[in-house]
Image: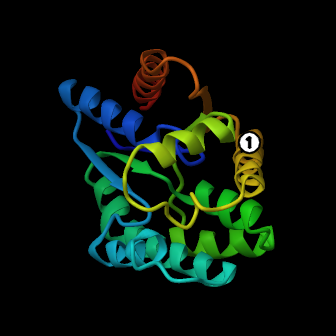
Amino acid sequence: MSLFITFEGIEGSGKTTHLRQLAAHLRASGHAVVETREPGGTPGGAAVRRILLGAEAVPLTAFAELCLYCADRAQHVDEVIRPALAAGRIVLSDRFSDSTIAYQGYGRALDLEAVRALDARARGGVTPGLTFLLDCPVEEGLARARGRTSAPADRFEREAFAFHERVRAGFHARAATEPARFVVLDAAGPLARVQECVVAEAVRRLGARP
């Protein structure tokens, strides 16, 4: 039974942690699961990730940044997501289209219609069936993100507080337009409680599918 589930949120919201825990639970229940991420879910995407977020990241215009994310997505959809769904697997992705709308549309203040159009072309009709929005205050998320590694902060972790507030607002705007797809969770709450909600909703959606 295939289902495309995405995890979204600001920096430090716990997306990766909750994705991995859900993947482990689903596999233990006998499901075939593919874990992936954006950017970087393919070999080509890994090269894009290094340009965007790695130690060799270079300054980019907002539009160039958008184009790189969408190039990564086009390859990701064709090489990983679409084939896995066609094979009946559950795909769990750490970020997808909603991050592009939130970060490049709201955060970078690019024209939202242009961002949506380029994203739509990149994903080629693939849409998540369920999206978990891990929500927490910006100050808490940034403190987690900046404190979890000794590596230098990436291009987004270095952005001003106001940028992250716009991104968070963008995610909330996305969730408000598609309430049937989004599950908004308080990521500032106890980890175990958040994970319980993630697992329960994923299992419910899987059980409700024909």
Question: Going 49% across and 21% down the picture, which residue do you hit?
Answer: 194
- Direction from residue 108 to residue 182 in the image, left or right: left
Kind of residue sitting beneath label 1: His
Horizontal and vertical percent position of residue 124: 52, 70
Is residue 57 visible from the viewing direction of this image?
yes
- Of 200 and 134, nearer the camera is 134
Quadrant that contains the N terminus: top left
Task: Identify the image quadrant of residue 63.
Answer: bottom right
Quadrant that contains the C terminus: top left
Task: Give the image's coloring scheme.
Answer: rainbow
Residue 89 position (above or below residue 80): above
Horizontal and vertical percent position of residue 200: 44, 19
Question: Going 61% across and 35% down the picture, which residue do you hit?
Answer: 140
Element type at mark 1? helix
- Of 121 and 60, nearer the camera is 60
- Direction from residue 48 to residue 120 in the image, left or right: right
- Which residue matches tag 1? 172
- Of 39 and 10, nearer the camera is 10
Task: Identify the image quadrant of residue 185.
Answer: top right
Residue 122 position (above or below residue 194): below
Mark 1 neighbour density, 10 Å: few (under 14) some (14–19) many (20 or more): some
Is residue 124 visible from the viewing direction of this image?
no
